[in-house]
Amino acid sequence: MPALRWPKVILYWAMKDGRRVVAAAHYVARLGEKRGEIVRHVLESGGRAEVQDDLMVRFASKKARYRDFDRRVLGPLVEAGILERPMAGLEIAWRAEVAPVFDRLGLPAPPPTRDPARGRTDHGQAFDWLHGEFTSVRRSDPGATW
């Protein structure tokens, strides 16, 4: 995991014609102190934090927009694998990715999730039956190693 300090440039010096000159430079990408504070806050909050009601109140400027804060401040933490996108964000990204496929096939898009925070917890009877079929072997011997 990259250090949670500000980025920096490391200069490599050499002598040329009796003068000290920069021979090479290396950019060290780091996520920054502010993002480090965000990670600490999320960990102290039990691993969960609401972006608008919690993180933006504590870490964003008064004029910051949600999408800018999400993309510019939280985006690098998501790309580094430190944070995950909230379910609502995942649903939006998924819909954008599958929409062209549904359009190409002439299928209607699935209805929006009623409550993205609940994720996969509300299923109908059809899923309950299917889940029972798929887990029947595991339930037959719970102590077994599969």
Image: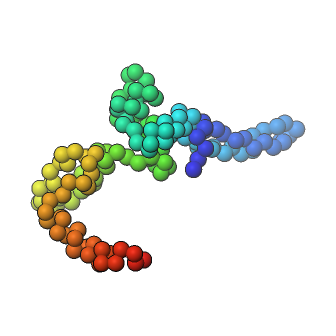
The image's colouring method is rainbow
Camera sees residue 106: yes
What residue sits 26% from the left and 55% below the top?
A: 120
Residue 19 is drawn in which quadrant? top right
Query: Measured along the vertical axis of the image, is residue 136 above or below residue 63?
Result: below
State whether residue 76 appears in this view.
no
Between 145 and 7, the one lying in front of the other is: 145
Q: Is residue 91 left or right of residue 69?
A: left
Q: Is residue 102 left or right of residue 12?
A: left
Rendered location of residue 41, percent (x, y): 49, 36
Q: Residue furthest right?
A: 18
Q: Residue at x 43, y 24 (%)?
A: 61
Q: Residue furthest top?
A: 62
Disc tally is 0
Q: State the image quarter where residue 4 is shown.
A: top right
- Specify the quadrant that holds the C terminus: bottom left
Q: Is residue 25 above or below residue 61?
A: below
Which residue is pictured at 57% across the width and 50% down the height? Answer: 1
The answer to which of 27 and 14 lies nearer the viewer is 27
Looking at the image, which residue is at 23% across and 68% down?
A: 131
Vertical order, 90 against 145 (above or below): above
Q: Nearer the viewer, residue 96 or 16?
A: 96
Where in the figure is residue 48, as x and y percent of width and height? 40, 42
Q: Position of residue 66 (x, y in %)?
A: 35, 32
Q: Position of residue 65 (x, y in %)?
A: 35, 29
